[in-house]
Image (cartoon, rainbow, N blue to C red):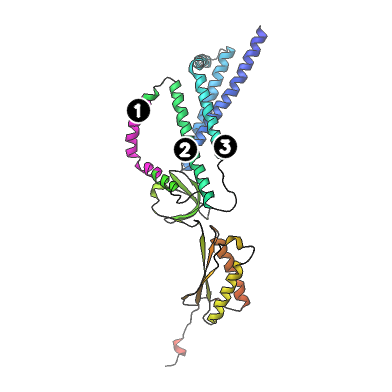
Amino acid sequence: METSSLWLDTLISIGLLILGFWVGRAGAGLAGWLARLTPDTRDDRYWRWAGWLWWGLTGVMVASLAVHVWQAELEPLRSWGQNLSGWLGERGLAVLLIIGATSLALRLVPRLLQRIPVENGEFSRQQVRAQTLKGVLEAVLQVFIVVFGLLLVLSNLGLNVTALLAGAGVVGLGISLAAQNLIRDVLNGFFILLEDQYGVGDVITVDQLSGGVERFNLRVTVLRDLEGRVHFIPNSTIQQVTVMSRDWARAVVDVSVAYETPVDKALEVVRTEAEAFYHNPEWKDKFTDQAPEMLGIQQLAESGIVIRVLFNTKPKQQWAIGREFRRRIKLRLDAERIEIPYPTRRIVNPENSNP
């Protein structure tokens, strides 16, 4: 009889360890998810502390239950374990099941949203739209699951959820008056999404900030610039946005030649090089169907003649096209012995000048 009781206590203890690990991991994971919702990374340490505190609390609970199971004379752990086992028998099991279901639902959301088709090939508006919708839906569904699970937990703990929701409505009205910027963020983000102004993967300029949209939700737009810096922009502050990757783009290239160069020859060289570049098989798929447009002489600058040529490109290809054409035209000008102007300064000595 004593042997069977020993085995039973051992199995219960092992089960407590497994349950404690699962509860601790679920609570710490929830703290990490809340940390990712905050735009300021400086707040992450507080959520890490919350996760460690939850692990510590879970460890004390498991230790108390184990002491109660083995009937060890360790106070106050034995008393805590006795009270905790009584609570688990009444309401705790349902609470643990709700926490487990909530944690499982949070993990299933990204897997379910993977079914939304996203094109992995050429950059397109459908790709941007799908990626943006996936990000917004994931955030909204996760918030809904956490709030719903929290309400179920409070209901099983004996709280009047209906009265709590009614009170929260009154309190929420007062909070909304103080959180008008947050409401404006959400409304502006909703219309940005509804009108498909921009999305994840687009390259945009907001005020003086430019970069690729790395993340977008109803509250904030996250940009990463060329130097890798990340900018968090509340949607309510976005009054005007310039999208540089919408449907098609254009590379504007100015080529300067010296005044001594025959103008017609310079125009012909730039035109033929632009056409050759456009028909190059390695770069053909980066252009649209429209051929390069030779505008001609754009400016008579101080040190040279500026010739402008336009290339219509596919989205986000204008920078690569511009860099490659500048390389090609430099090699062509060198081959044609056409000089590229550079600033010069003429100094006259008054002593040597004629009266």
- In what quadrant of the picture does the N terminus appear? top right
Q: Give the residue type at disc 1.
A: Ala
Q: Which residue lies furthest to the right in this view?
A: 3
Compare marks 2 and 3 and give the one earlier in the sequence. Answer: 3
Q: Which mark is residue 140?
A: 2
Q: Mark 3 points at which residue?
A: 111
* Rendering coords of residue 116 (x, y %): 55, 42
Q: How far apart are marks 3 and 1 (CA)?
A: 34 Å
As drawn, 153 above or below 306: above
* Rendering coords of residue 21 (x, y %): 58, 26
First to last magenta residue range:
163-186
Q: Residue 166 carries which label?
A: 1
Q: Quadrant of residue 11?
A: top right
Q: Which residue is drawn at 58% across and 67% down?
A: 325
Q: Do the residues labelled 3 and 1 touch (CB within 8 Å)?
A: no
Q: Residue at x 51, y 36 (%)?
A: 33
Compare marks 3 and 1 and give the one earlier in the sequence. Answer: 3
Count of residue discs: 3
Compare marks 2 and 1 and give the one earlier in the sequence. Answer: 2
Q: What SS does tag 3 mark? A: helix
